[in-house]
Amino acid sequence: MTEKLSENDRIRKELISDVLHDFQSPLLNIKGYAELLLDGELSVEKRRSYAFVIQSETERLSSLTKQLLLLTSLDQLSSPLELTTFSLDVQLKETVRKYRWLLEEKNLTLSMDLDEVKFTGDPAFLEKVWENLISNALKYSIPEGTIDIELREQANNVIVAVSDNGIGISKKEIERIFDRFYRADDSRTQKISGTGLGLSIVQQVVKLHQGTIEVASQNGGTTTFIITLPKL
């Protein structure tokens, strides 16, 4: 029992350390560039550049805060999900619509092959699943790449698959991608923004719906996330 408690304490300390680091880094950047802006002799170009960094880091902090609040609510969820019967295919289409601008910006091709599915689940939480999976596919896709979204209804389950032909995930990384705050230490991903919390949220919401999530990927090739949700 003592060993178990000490292991839990170790994990908790690591998470706290990760949280502090993820907040400290953008705060230091905001502070540093705000001080640079006080220089009255700065050129207009440099002012715009520094302001852009501050704006970007502020958005990063906002995203991190929202993700942490959502994870906290999921961790403390003891009451049943707020189950509602809704059109899952419509929800997926509406989620994709939010990211149309990024599809056009990166000149990506998107295909959707969706069964018309009435599903009983918590639509608010499931929307976060699709947002995270689709936004990840968009972020990690190569320019002029393709993203495929499928929705299939079976006798006892519904299956959602999100695929992209981006940079791929190595086998070693797949083992850790659902860990909170984990981000691959890879030169290909260093310039891609993220909190390292999105896939942890995806996994937790899927588990609350008694479902499963699988990942199939090749390093430098296609990545597919497959969500299987039982009909409740």
Image: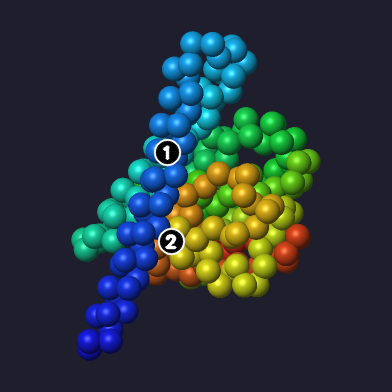
- Give residue 22's position: percent from left, percent from top: 42, 49
Q: Front-most of 4 and 177?
A: 4
Q: How is the image coloured?
A: rainbow
Please tell me whether residue 25 is drawn above or below residue 164 in the rendered image.
above
Q: CA distance from mark 2 to mark 1?
A: 22 Å
- Give residue 88's position: percent from left, percent from top: 49, 50
Is residue 29 in sight in this rendering?
yes
Which disc is residue 180 wearing?
2
Direction from residue 1 to residue 109 in the image, left or right? right
Direction from residue 188 to residue 122 in the image, left or right? left
N-term-proximal mark, 2 vs 1:
1
Quadrant of the rendered image containing residue 209: bottom left
How many C-alpha atoms fall within 10 Å of the one at disc 1: few (<14), some, or many (≥20)? few
Please tell me whether residue 139 is drawn above or below residue 181 in the rendered image.
above
Secondary structure of the residue carrying tag 1 is: helix
Residue at (62, 30) in percent of width and height: 101
